[in-house]
Amino acid sequence: MDLDSMDCTSTIDVTHDDEEIHQDRHSYASFSKHHSNNNTNANAASGLLPTTTSVHELLECPVCTNSMYPPIHQCQNGHTLCSTCKNRVHNRCPTCRQELGDIRCLALEKVAESLELPCKYMSLGCPEIFPYYGKPKHETVCDFRPYSCPYAGSECSVMGDIPFLVAHLRDDHKVDMHSGCTFNHRYVKSNPREVENATWMLTVFYCFGEYFCLHFEAFQLGMAPVYMAFLRFMGDETEARNYNYSLEVGGYGRKLIWEGTPRSVRDSHRKVRDSHDGLIIQRNMALFFSGGDRKELKLRVTGRIWKEQQHSGEAGGGGACIPNLS
């Protein structure tokens, strides 16, 4: 499907007359990780016990440079490697080229049990220290781990913290960047019958000192073609729960309204879309709202982001301040 045929007209909440037209674009960015292989062998003749750092380096696989976990394999000459790489090297030691066989390095596995190491995201702020074998589990959910690029138009592998990703979205993907907590967008498509995995340009809003991503997509929900709009928060899920948003679409005396909590960008846009957590509009209804001969999509979506009251006693009883979109 030719995504360049889809236009999106964006209107900021100051007035409904000034419209900014842009083409849907898809930029690709690459991200490469640089690994250093600093394997250090303990000097048995010196009689000195190896430091934690040198033991950790001994636990680094010489092939993939990742930390090794049981089963750790070794050749007859004592060279070690991880179980994943053992299959990749066709049972040949990558150091001495001897046949590996099925020898386990039980001594190194036992040494690993005694280690306590910092989280690999220590440089990003994580202060935690874990037993060697418990570290991977924490690192999969660490609050300091990098975020993935939230751009939905390509398989972008860029990762980083929120300020880095905001700059990446602006400079590499050329997304729309706006300030303000209300919005008024018009999504246009010349052939609305083509809905398979159509994606409009991502819009990023700066609101309450945080960043939010507005998505608009078309896809098949079972046998029914639908359009869907939803919001994601550029931060963790616990922070996302502090906010609410609403989306509204309508025309000719009819309207649909969605209210919910933005999902964190920790959840991929596909995961959010497949959970149907947003404003879903069936194609026939979308064309009705578009007016005219219903041969072209001209859908206006308005919305607002607001912050939950911090205490239930505030604002005369608390709860969410329901936005007035009329």
Image (cartoon, helix red, strand yellow):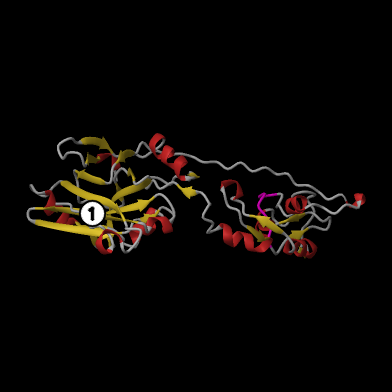
Query: In the image, is residue 68 part of the stretch drawn in magenta?
Result: yes
Location of residue 105 in the rendering, given as x and y in whole percent from the top left corner: 78, 62
Location of residue 278 in the rendering, given as x and y in whole percent from the top left corner: 28, 58
Is 18 in front, or is 313?
A: 313
Is 259 in front, or is 249?
A: 259
Q: Which secondary structure lies at badge 1?
A: strand
In the image, the segment drawn in magenta is: 63-69
From the image, tell me which residue sits under label 1. 247
Q: Is residue 66 visible?
A: yes
Report the predominant secondary structure element of the magenta stretch: loop
In this rendering, position of residue 296 left or right of residue 167: left
- Which kind of residue does numbered mark 1 sit on? Leu
Location of residue 25 in the rendering, given as x and y in whole percent from the top left corner: 33, 38
Location of residue 240 in the rendering, given as x and y in whole percent from the top left corner: 38, 56
Query: In the image, is residue 209 part of the stretch drawn in magenta?
Result: no
In this rendering, position of residue 137 left or right of residue 63: left
Is 169 in front, or is 183?
A: 183
Q: Is residue 70 above or below residue 2?
A: below
- Which residue is at a point 62% across and 54% down the rendered structure image? 119
